[in-house]
Amino acid sequence: MKKKLGFAFGFLWLAGPLVLAQTVAPEPAVPSGLAEAKAAQAAAPYSLLDSALFYQLLVGEMTLQEGEPAAGFALMLDAARKTGDAQLYQRATDIALQSRSGDSALQAAQAWKQAQPASREANRYVLQILIALNRIADTVEPLKTEIRLAPDVERPAVLAAVPRVYARVSDKKLASSVVEEALADYLSTPATRSAAWATVGRMRLAASDNKGALEAAQRSQAADNRAEAPVLVALELMDLKLPEAEGLVQKYFEGNTKALPELRMGYARVLLELQRYTEATTQLKIVTQEKPDFPEGWLVLGSLQLQDNQLPQAQTSLERYVALAQQQKPQDETTRGLAQAYLSLSQLAEKRKDYAAAENWLNKIENSSDLAQAQIRRASILASQGKLEAARQLIRQLPERNPGDARLKLNAEVGLLRDSKQYQLAHDVLAQALIMTPEEPDLLYDQSMMAEKLSRMDEMERLLRQVILLRPDYYQAYNALGYSLADRSVRLPEARELIQKALEFAPSDPFIKDSLGWVEFRAGNKAEAIRIFEAAYKAKPDAEIAAHFGEVLWSLGQRERAVAIWKEGQLINSDNETLLETLKRLQVKL
């Protein structure tokens, strides 16, 4: 028992001094064994604690130790009311929270706030407990108080933090209206107008009021066109069919020499998600030019250049990232970024057939979570050297700690077989996987692509229609089926309808636009086909788009331009099957 008492009092006195009166109270008797309490009491000569209150606190802590939180809470709250001490109010509130008694916690926090109206800590407790109790409508006044009590210099930051406070609230619309009501005075005050409207924008965004969020972001930027907060809202709205949102982002960057590189990176990432690759590359180049010591810009730019087969540029960008990242303190994000860069540099070396260099890059990967990707890259190196079975075996030996690992291995093996043109083997591997999960859309889609390679067009169509039935929003299936029909010049109206359906889900996808251009060409609408291919190729210079674009130009007698486009495509990817087949069929030598 003495050990428990000592622990209780040690905790109590470490909480801080209690000022109870203007005269020194007699030193209370300390039970034998409570050295911590006696030492703490001696160290606080100005703490005035009468014997009755001392005993009350002792009993309260002992009661808690004995597993009776309700009694301990009552004693502690009573002591807090008698003394007016903030730490005792906080202790009483914490006791109630720890015992999962929300109403008692609210009672203590409100008593604390009433006793000390200027206490931000007391008000925060009230606000957070009300939210935890889902009494969102009651948080208007505490939120107003929190913002009012904040010093002027801190107020914008406090406003910016509000959406996080309400992040877990289930009724987002109610939370949005409550916050907007609480912020009413700050929406028109010059010093806080921009931050307040940005907060309203984030709350409306969380409530799925996208147009309202855009309006709030516009008001925020109108108050301060160099503020970052409205840009963050606009970036989240860019892919929600609100073109005005991008205008806010672009306006922030216009002539802004202090624009944050992180925001430009965010803009580039959204452009990549929208498959606007050329524009994304432009933004990444601006980042690396304006902030050459900003590592992430080089990593994403290098990855995009590798994807576009710009191998020397990708090598330079990725090595620049590695040099910058290695100068930073080790962090999870940096470790993951380095692993990604090493994997990409290994792939670059493999493309040059420098397999020793490829292996050396992989050996630099230390992060355990990336070792599976390193092994898959090693398997690709083996396959590139004609050791396909050894590569498959290396992948199959990878451990499967979760379903994601199993899927990663399957995708890797199918990818190796596809790249090695072993389409029947890939088809067989997928067929085996579909036995276990016969209605997995991604597997069915991959199987349809292998069926196409094997010229089993009926099977391909059956599988794609099954994907569409299972996942009506699987736009790749609409596009693949539409393109296949167009490529064979059959059922062209249906092909156009399928591809237009795909564009409803991904209106910016240049590859779907390429499919639509191919339909129009096959239907004899060459002028429309040229218009579509112009836009698709500008958005994404790609060998396959170049093959189709060039063929339309060739058919119109624009042969010099067709050859120029094909040469560009050949520089992008000289092994592209569609480009090679087109040149062979048209008997064109570049």
Image: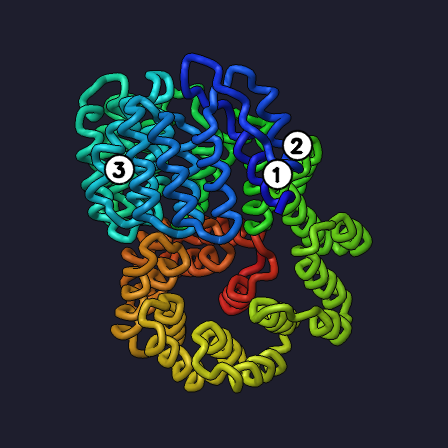
- Label 3 element class: helix
Task: Mark yes or no: residue 53 visible.
Answer: yes
Q: Which residue is mark 1?
A: 6
Of the residues shown, which amino acid type is indicated by label 1?
Gly
- Calculate the distance from the C-alpha at mark 3 to the C-alpha at mark 1: 52 Å
- Calculate the distance from the C-alpha at mark 2 to the C-alpha at mark 3: 56 Å
Marks 3 and 1: which is nearer the front?
A: 1
Point out residue 419 in the picture as x, y percentages from the top left corner: 63, 68
Work out which quarter of the rendered image holds the C terminus and state it: bottom right
| In this view, 466 is above or below 576 | below
Q: Rate crowding at label 1 as few (under 14), some (14 to 19) or many (20 or more) other CA atoms within 10 Å.
A: many
The residue under the point 62% across, 28% down is: 38
Q: Which residue is mark 2?
A: 35
Task: Mark 2 and mark 1 in contact? Answer it, CB < 8 Å.
Answer: yes
Mark identifier at residue 201? 3
Mark identifier at residue 15? none
Point out residue 350 in the picture as x, y percentages from the top left corner: 72, 55
Point out residue 382 in the picture as x, y percentages from the top left corner: 76, 66
Image quadrant where residue 487 sits: bottom left
Which sits in the foreground, 271 or 206? 206
- Label 1 element class: helix
Image quadrant where residue 188 sits: top left
